[in-house]
Amino acid sequence: MPSFYPDIHEELRPFFNPRSIAVIGASRHPSSPGYIIFQNLIENAKRGILKAKVYGVNIKGGEILGHRLFKSIKDVPSSVEHVVIAIPAKFVPSVMEECGEVRVKVATIISGGFSEIGNVELEKEVLRIAKKYRIRIIGPNGLGIYDAYSGVDTIFIPTYKDTDEGRKLNMPRPKPGYITFLSQSGALGDAVLDYMWGEDIGISKFVSWGNKIDVDESDLLLYLMDDETTRVVILYIEALKDNGRKLIEIGTEFSRKKPIVILKGGITEAGARATYSHTASLAGNIKIYETAFKAMGATLASNIIEVVDMAKALAYQPPAQGRNIGIVTNGGGPGIVVADLAERVGLRVPELSKETLQLLKEHVKNGLIPSIATFSNPIDITGTGTDESYTAATEAVLEDSRIDLVIVLAFHHPPTISKDMPVKLIKVIRDYKKPVLIMDMGSTDMSAWVRKKFEDAGIPAYSLPYRVVAGARALVEYGEWLRKKGILAKYIENWHPVILN
Amino acid sequence: MPSFYPDIHEELRPFFNPRSIAVIGASRHPSSPGYIIFQNLIENAKRGILKAKVYGVNIKGGEILGHRLFKSIKDVPSSVEHVVIAIPAKFVPSVMEECGEVRVKVATIISGGFSEIGNVELEKEVLRIAKKYRIRIIGPNGLGIYDAYSGVDTIFIPTYKDTDEGRKLNMPRPKPGYITFLSQSGALGDAVLDYMWGEDIGISKFVSWGNKIDVDESDLLLYLMDDETTRVVILYIEALKDNGRKLIEIGTEFSRKKPIVILKGGITEAGARATYSHTASLAGNIKIYETAFKAMGATLASNIIEVVDMAKALAYQPPAQGRNIGIVTNGGGPGIVVADLAERVGLRVPELSKETLQLLKEHVKNGLIPSIATFSNPIDITGTGTDESYTAATEAVLEDSRIDLVIVLAFHHPPTISKDMPVKLIKVIRDYKKPVLIMDMGSTDMSAWVRKKFEDAGIPAYSLPYRVVAGARALVEYGEWLRKKGILAKYIENWHPVILN
């Protein structure tokens, strides 16, 4: 950790693991942010996830959800480390003063109505007070924080909504996992969380910093460098005000330890124009951004589906030692589509070594692989291939020293493929530190079941060619960057699989 | 319809709407193709979907599923229009002879073991017999046909599979709809069907032609030109042997009436190498293909998710009259991401006209749109916007003559958005012949419910920025092609929305 930020870990710790937390603006209206956040926290405390003491503050006092509300943070009987502020913007400065007086350490400011609508002076005033009392701020005008492990949850989107066809889940929270997501946009953030939930992808932490007047991406990266449940960081960035150099410096340091995936908003004229009015910042020259992000070892995603697919690969598989992809399939067409996509994004799908071809031919002789199989890479065991054809072909390709990463199109459809195909393949794959990604296209419960089997064993599984190739590209590019830095071999040596239940 | 194919409709009709159909190779083994196909057809006849008489033929005779099996097609007591052949390749010629003798009209040959593994002569023999008796063939070595309306279903993938956690749906069939999918690859075909089922996208017909020794893409396009339930055709093509010129000619004619979306397999060296061994054909020069496909008015998709997303837009919305996209959102970040993606694929996201800006400002004054909203396109009504903000902003953009297509990011998350937002937006959108696409990101039942509301009203809804932009691009490119042909205005004049339940 760079020495110019010696205290960052203890400074930011109360955001994610507070000993006590208070919601200022805990309101009686069930659709109000203050109510929803207070309810989230009370609920998580009840379920034993959140270990902090939770307090509600409302200038009118009263009671909600069976909890007394204090009229001021100064009335709370014990010290409070973390305050969540969800009150009209104009009241924030005086409340911050009170927080300072009772030695609050960090504030997540949910309230909007600051620089994003021109109230620049009000925002400066809040920051001035925070500096005076050394309170760190996330926000204002953001969704704040979700920590799947500690139970801190300031997302003020209602969990359920009622429709004509009954109550529907409106805003889910992903299960605990190893991806941390830092987002300049709140709306993009909650959409991605919803999407991760649906794909059963775990999360460690989510932070939406809104106008970002204090804690920024760099601070968070420094904090996350030693966070055990963060194995990869997703960054959604629209603009870096004057802290670009700091991010590049800290990001480069971070990438030596853990991968970063970046989605940059505002890369075209229209996008940049929108960025300008959104969260009050300028998108700047995209070429400069892209060059800088690449130099710092981050993988650039071009859309939301890609950013999560890449993060999943990077969280669960080691980086690749080169660009050569081996593809095993039981469907000719999908194999071709994946090969095409891979080569289009700059990966290589080379012919296999003579030894591997020899081995595969022996498997045909032994009856392990059907005689109509083809081995030009993709290795197509065809629709008559069995579980054993899959394992034999996959093992052969994993052994081929020409191949740096293996994509197995593990299609469950044919009658010759049994329910045990995933288990058998996992056994083979687990013996290697060569990255493997799975694709089983489809939306049925059978295909979801197949993917889940692999993912429960730490092998990322995708539902579309496009998506598995994005994962492969991320592992290849990260590997190349590590090699340039001269630390790839050591990185892979130290790499260990995720321990899953 | 070009005059050189006067009889195509009646020639191919028995594939999709036979008066009688026989499965040759109806087998007692529940996992065998012959059993599965026979079962599909019997089931569909029982449910009243399939109107044809169904017969089973097995050289050993016997009985399955309570139906007598005939030892030969010649023993079937009445005439048979369509035979599905699922027996070892070497027996196919003699069976075809028998079919010819009893005046069978069409044969779907499922059996593999022909040119794809070097048995070129055997394949030629089959074709020779077919020509002699004027039997049209789909196949061999393909999945055959699925027609969601007529109940013809020769897909031999088991519908269910048993796992440790119970019986799982293995291979679903999408509901009836307006997209027809013609696929050179069977495996890609069933994966796409599975995926369409999961996204609740309807299908009209699916054809997998395998080695394609007789009926080809062009024949099928001619047939589909007047097919009422086909509003768009998806083509997955790996290679065109010597029938490329015919496809371009007929495809151009087809595009004047209905759109085509093409996914081309084998566009890179590795993909082409694999194609060479798959379905025994050469991928050829991709540049030539791409130029030809564009000239014939087809939209080129670069992957499987795109091909379906484009088809959905083209099936349900009119083509766009230009490249200018208007974006309405309540989340700044997602709006920026969509604007970026749109400009990246060559669409334009221009500033709105003065009149529209004036109108939007009035809506702010009236309190319909929040004062913190921004109008630079994306029009961001912000997370505090209401249902009424959405309808007011969407209507304003639809009225703007600068804008050719509108993307509404209809996010359900904020507390200010009610369950009636879709219904209210649909009312506004329906009054225009300007194409509109919806995006609501997320995987919860709430977001699926929102998307379904729109789709049930004929307005395509997408779950990701990338996907909605693909849909928009297809509508823009098809519109441009029609304009070049001088028929865009007439096309839009004649265009009518899908009638949905």
Image (cartoon, coloured by chain):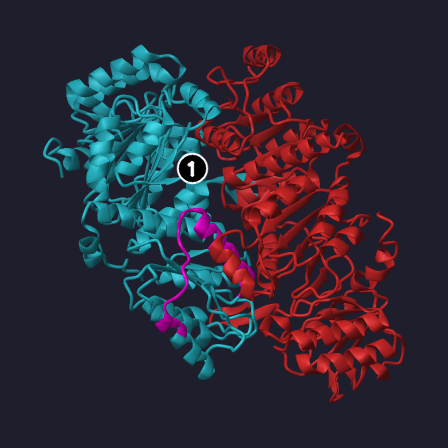
Chain colours: A red, B cyan
Question: In the displayed structure, would residue A396 be above or below residue A444?
Answer: above
Q: Nearer the viewer, residue A141 or B60?
A: A141
Question: In the displayed structure, would residue A233 be above or below residue B453?
Answer: above
The verdict on residue A275 being magenta is: no
User: In screen coordinates, is B480 left or right of B363?
Assistant: left
Residue underneath mark 1: B190
The quarter of the rendered structure image containing the C terminus of chain A is top right
Q: Nearer the viewer, residue A500 or B263?
A: B263
Q: How many marks?
A: 1
Q: Residue at x 28, y 48 (%)?
A: B480
Instruction: Determine the image quadrant of residue B95.
Output: top left
* Relative image position of residue B120 (x, y in whole percent): 32, 12
Question: Bounds of the magenta span?
Answer: B331-357
Q: Secondary structure beneath disc 1? A: helix
Question: In the displayed structure, would residue A33 be above or below residue B166?
Answer: below
* Relative image position of residue B238 (x, y in whole percent): 37, 28
Instruction: Determine the image quadrant of residue B277.
Output: top left
Q: Main secondary structure of the magenta part?
A: helix
* Relative image position of residue A215 (x, y in whole percent): 75, 61
User: In screen coordinates, is B244 left or right of B238?
Assistant: left
Residue B208 visible? The answer is no
Which residue is situated farthest in the right direction here? A78
Instruction: Determine the image quadrant of residue B83.
Output: top left
Q: Residue at x 77, y 28 (%)?
A: A489
Residue A359 visible? The answer is yes
Query: Disc 1 residue type?
Result: Asp
Q: Nearer the viewer, residue A311 or B339?
A: B339
* Relative image position of residue A5 (x, y in whole percent): 85, 54
Q: Residues within 10 Å of mark 1 (few under 14, many from 20)?
A: many
Question: In the displayed structure, would residue B377 be above or below residue A114?
Answer: above
Q: Nearer the viewer, residue A16 or B398?
A: B398
Tell which subunit mark 1 falls on. B
